[in-house]
Image (cartoon, coloured by chain):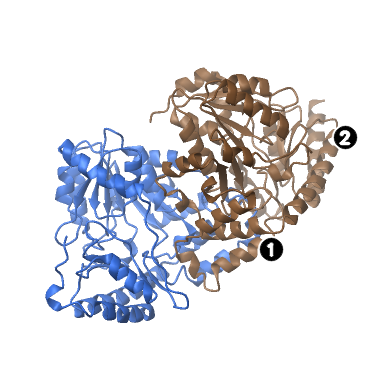
Amino acid sequence: MSVSRRGLFEVLSRAGTQSATARAPLPSAPPGVTEIRISSNENPLGPGKTVVDAMMTRFGEVGRYPFNNLTANEANLTAAIAAKQQVKPENVVLAVGSQELLRNAVRAFTSPYRHLVTAAPTFENCTKVASALKHPVVEAKVDSAFKLDLESMLATVRGAGLVFVNNPNNPTATVHGIKTITDFVERVHRVSPDTVIFIDEAYHDYVTDPNYQTAIPLAMAMPNVFVARTFSKAYGMAGMRIGYAIGQPDTIKPLERLRMPMTLSVFTVGAALVALADQKHIDDERARNTAVRDFTMKAFVDMGCKPTASQANFLFVDIGRPAQGFRDACAQKGVIIGRDFPPFENSHARISIGTMAEMTKAVDVFRDILRPLSPSNAGKGGN
Amino acid sequence: MAINRRRFVQTMGAGAAGAWIAGRGLEGGLWPELAAMQGTSGAAAVSPIILSSNENPVGPGKVVLDAVRAALGASGGPAGRYSNAAGALTEAIAKKFGVKPENVALGCGSTQLLRSSTHLFTGPTKALVATIPAYEECAGYADMMGHPVRAVPLGPDLKMDLDKLADASRGAGLVFYCNPNNPVSTYVGARPTRDYISRVNRISPDTTILIDEAYFDYVTDPDHATHVPLAVEDPRVLVARTFSKAYGMAGLRLGYAIGHADTIKKMQDLDAATGNSSLNVLAMQAGIAAIAQDPGFIAAERARNTSSRDFTMKWFMDHGMKPADSQANFMFVNLGRPAKDFRDACAAKGVKVGRDFPPYEKTHCRISFGTMDEMQKAVVVFGEVLAKRAETAA
């Protein structure tokens, strides 16, 4: 391992502190103020009518385990996902939200002697679970464009158990193209062939960059690579808790073994089956998000605040002041935005993309709060 | 985390080791046959009666279904939001039992809680103890982790033999105490259970006892009490509950554990506080409504089940077959023939009964109680299947 023990200890102690202090609850809107919730990268419209109608047909089946259900059962769902992604059912592991995959990947592939390589900032679950297990964690800070710094990650990958690649990256909203990802995966394999690479494509459906493509074909072609997807984002089903992983059977077998049985509700399975069949709904959702994203990014640029190149349903924007003060001021006006994301908590806020109506109101609130900011201070937040 | 299959086999004996786990997951296997049958012209009218999974055949009732509808709203929008209802649900459960929220852990069905307690309290030198048969989740998980499993045979009346169980508990990490015991349906009263717990506390003070009260609401034995009050006082006792049985919510996936605050915290820390991410919003809102509803709902469901149970048990006794003394919403009956033969023959006639439960799979079958109407139809099928087999044998 090319990381010094001291460096590792520093990283670990910070991660440990994070996990010990449970995530602080977000502020809420004052009584009587309509809340605009743009804090959790959800689809503001939910799953859509087709899916909700399908859920409404399941009320008579609530008393039965889903494995007793003729249609809304896991075997049918696995087959439907496999068909959609053009893989075989043996390449699919279901999960109760992608969080189960994050948790179980750390349990399965890292150990006290095989570290986790991840980014800072990125989605924190892997880091939290590894810290709780006292497995070493090495974090590579994102680059100056707020993209995953794959070169830095590569430098620490030798002997690692798991590399977590969130693409697009939450919270920085940036994406790497498929050529870059393929090159990274091949180099990791050369340097450290036993290291497993976890490519989390939670925000896949929101990407518009033509250089981006899913890494599912890569995972199908190479051992020790798998891709995770979730229904919590574009599919609008965060409350229903469902995700899945795709990879070669030998790669995903440990995830299948650690998977809790019987985790998906009959509503969840029924909804997912119908949602998978409606690609137009997802395409429409991408177009809707892109329009609102463009509007919101332009508004921030006009205010003198620089957002990163967002390829997701959220922005990471340099507001030139601590996120917490901005967040609390927004909450006072009913606008709930994202939590702190160290090491950028003193300069950047994460703002999810709501509907156009919500963002039109939210942008007015942002403008009011940010107005006192003089142009000379913009973009100088401490990193 | 390699599986130490050898250790497991040494503990259980080669035959038993495979056998215990073998029954898992077989329940779903009959569905393709039934679905195919429904699709064929001749048998298109076959309407399966599901007596295989110890569910409440009537479902959760209006209060809960209305809560699910309300949770979805007119547009279904809330299904798109991460839910923070876990806190309210935890408080509702705590209130119901007169305990504090820090005594309650939520789970995706009781499965999550059985797994996390097995993870926490067993180890390479700390065995899991359970009767054989018993619900397989803890034994299966301990086996997967490479932790030893001690299987304790039941007494002659298919009740837990508390002397044998106490002997096996010595030095163990966790005792899985399923009461009423699935799949055998028998029940050990509150008083002998308390005696067993204090005995284990005395002879093996580091052993934790997990009392699975999944079928608690179906018990009619007068010596009946929950062990929740003991669990909140004693870190070595933990109670698991589920909404999948009397509450009729198996399709929603929700359970909980109640215990000492330190034990509950350990369970939550194991998941690095991500455990509640397995709970869907509809289940949580349904749970809040279910736990707060009039206790008359559970009393009525217990009475409904007791009628079906009395009717079905009597039918088997009248036909010369002896079921174990059921205190649950299922029975375990000696048919004197392999469960598989009976199960397949019943499935062909649209009645789905329980999977194999070694070491009794050559003689006994588990049959869940449906509605009275379903049981009246089912016993006709049982009669036909059992008569046919008797003729063949004769």
Which amino acid type is shown beneath numbered disc 2? Asp
Q: Is residue B28 shown above or below B387?
A: below
- Chain holding disc 1: B
Sequence-wise, the earlier of marks 1 and 2 is: 1
Residue highlighted by disc 1: B62
Q: Residue B251: tell me if it is visible.
A: no
- The percent position of residue B104, horizontal first and vertical second, equals 54, 47
Give the drawing colour for chain B. Answer: brown
Q: Residue A336: tell me if it is visible.
A: yes
- The percent position of residue B262, horizontal first and vertical second, equals 48, 40
Give the drawing colour for chain A. Answer: blue
Please tell me how crowded label 1 is: few (under 14), some (14-19), or many (20+) other residues with Cα within 10 Å. few
Is residue B269 shown left or right of residue A160?
right
Residue at mark 1 to residue at mark 2: CA–CA distance: 37 Å
Residue highlighted by disc 2: B318
Q: Quadrant of residue A54?
A: bottom right
Residues B115 and B234: in front is B234
Same-chain check, marks 1 and 2? yes
